[in-house]
Amino acid sequence: MKHKEKTFKGLGVAPGIGIGVAHVREGGAIEVPTYPIPARQVAKECARLEAAVTRARRQIGRLRTKARGMSEAVAEELVYLLDAYFHMLKDSRLVRGAARRITGDRINAEAAVEAEMAEIAKGFAAMDDAYIKARVEDIRALATRLVRNLTKTPVKPWSLVPKGSVVVTGELSPADVAQLDRSRIAGVATTLGGAEGHTAIMARALGLPAVLGVPGLIDGAQPGQPMIVDGDTGHVVVDPSPATLAAYERRHAESVRQARRLARLSKQPAVTRDGTEVLLQANVELPIEMTLVKQAGAAGIGLLRTEFMFMNRDDIPGEDEQYQALRDLIEPMKGQAVTVRTLDVGGEKTSAALMGDFGASASSALGLRGIRMSLARADVFETQFRAILRAADHGHVRILLPMVSTVSEVRRAREILGQAASRLKRRGFSVVDPLPALGTMIEVPGAALAADSLAQVSDFFAIGSNDLTMYTLAIDRGDEQVARLYDPLHPSVLRLIQFSTEAALHARIPVSICGEMAGDPRYTALLLGLGLREFSMVASSIPRVKQRIRNLDLVAADHRARVIMDQVDAGRIATLLDDFNALA
Ligand code: PEP
Ligand code: MG
């Protein structure tokens, strides 16, 4: 039979490959009758709405009980969401507005719910913020539930979906996703929905490959057709050719193997064969990474880049907004350390509102970047400190300063931190006592060479090998023309790492490494040999680095590091390291 392979493109919102058979389900739209009601029937119609609301609360209560029995990541997300639904059913514009329409417009309850929903949706569509915009999905899910209850349209149970299905539908509510049995369903593809919605968040939490927002999908896929969902790239393939299928099967098998390794290692300690414990933490750039941080078994967040709050907007986020965002990241870590780095814009990382004031200097890698920018806008700096201090009440927080080159910068930052604390106390906030540890990024060669003096004013160090390599070798991180010269194994970079680490150990302050080097198992033995015991990396790298650590003998790694540090040539260093890695 000839294959008419069709490929669609949507938003890959939950990673992984799903291969199965299309289970097409038309969207949740229900035929809603609209009819006028006489004045004497208004009270009765209001009572119908009330009954539908009560029923919905019971249904949500049952879902909540069910959610509590699910895996931790899913339960946490879903219970939070269902609580919000519960609250909305008590008092929300949707329910109040629908009741008003029954009395004022004299229409039936289901039509009143629909009309109110349409009005609310219009308001949300006008929002600029993608996250807020996506919240309309939650309200729509409730409206659909009320209409179902009013029209007595039962929900087709998801448990009847055949094993091995790829669910294809117009729209899936988060509650729908929570009912999908991960062991029966290979993947999900929908025509509606965005990456910021709870549906996407839930799919990620469940580890269910998902592509949302795929135009033309419903008409393009027939029930029973073979299908592939690629949650990594956002592709959906209907009726794949044997070659396409084989290629995806290979990728699927590899990702299953990797997921198994990940699951197996997440609860294992990161200890070398000869018993030295290593701290493996996560770098977080976007809140969306938190599920993986948990899954990967990270022992805290070693680098929380706060730039995400300042980019892609024309204004500067206020204290409350920053506090909320930080609190949402800190609270789930349940007391594990979270190292919040203060703003590091400038250079390639932009913030329109901040950089506008400083012209070319702010976009130069050698200009007003990181702490230099923060000190130039002490008001913004203090606001960020206040937000961090308030968020510190919800967990264990450390504060990290980027792009430091002199002792005076750290001293001045500490003064501003003190001012932020005093202002908060005057406003009646409780402030953690003692104040959070204040650490310094070692990522400018001058800072590395002055690490012994910086250690006197810093509570900890975090070595940023990305910038340290770039500035030491004078190679732009983002320039592909010189990319081949970018080499963290250059003896100069290694010496700076070694010197900074020794300075920290000598001053008895903690030291970690959080550049990309930390997440590459090729470098693990060498970094351990240089004395580092704390690594922070993108969460998905933690299992691979942990595996490397568990296979390593620290005495041998120390010995190899000593040999390597006697070398003068980066090529020779690479060979010595790769030989060691191949053996142990
Ligand atoms: C680094 O420079 O190594 C680092 C971790 O900081 P960033 O990559 O955010 O500049
Ligand atoms: Mg850096």
Image: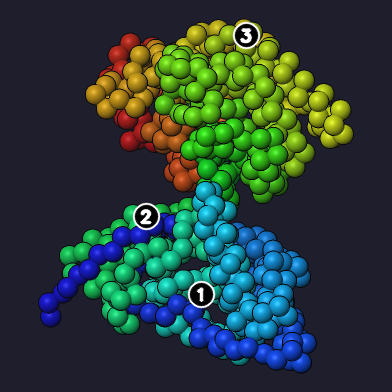
Depth order, front residue of 293/222:
222
Locate residue 405, reporting x and y percent: 54, 11
Locate residue 414, reporting x and y percent: 71, 17
What residue is at 75 percent from the left and 42 percent from the top? 394
What residue is shown with label 1? 181
What residue is at 31 percent from the left and 30 percent from the top? 579
Say left or right for 516 vs 254.
right
State whether residue 104 is above or below residue 152.
Answer: above
- Name which of mark 2 and mark 1 comes first in the sequence: 1
- Name which of mark 3 and mark 1 comes first in the sequence: 1
What residue is at 42 percent from the left and 80 percent from the top? 26
Depth order, front residue of 242/28:
28
Mark 2 burial class by Cα count in 10 Å: few <14, some 14-19, many 20+: some
Mark 3 burial class by Cα count in 10 Å: few <14, some 14-19, many 20+: some
**Identity, as a three-letter code, of the amino acid under mark 3:** Val
Say left or right for 461 vs 523.
right
What residue is shown with label 2? 232
Question: Which is more foreground, mark 2 or mark 1?
Answer: 2
Mark 1 burial class by Cα count in 10 Å: few <14, some 14-19, many 20+: some
Element on which disc 3 rests: helix
**Identity, as a three-letter code, of the amino acid under mark 1:** Asp
Say left or right for 143 vs 195.
right
State whether residue 284 is above or below residue 465.
Answer: below
Tell me the CA gap for discs 2 and 3: 44 Å
What residue is shown with label 3? 407
Image quadrant containing the N terminus: bottom left
Element on which disc 2 rests: loop
**Identity, as a three-letter code, of the amino acid under mark 2:** Asp
Image quadrant containing the C terminus: top left
> Do the CB atoms of the residues marked 3 and 1 lie less than 8 Å apart?
no
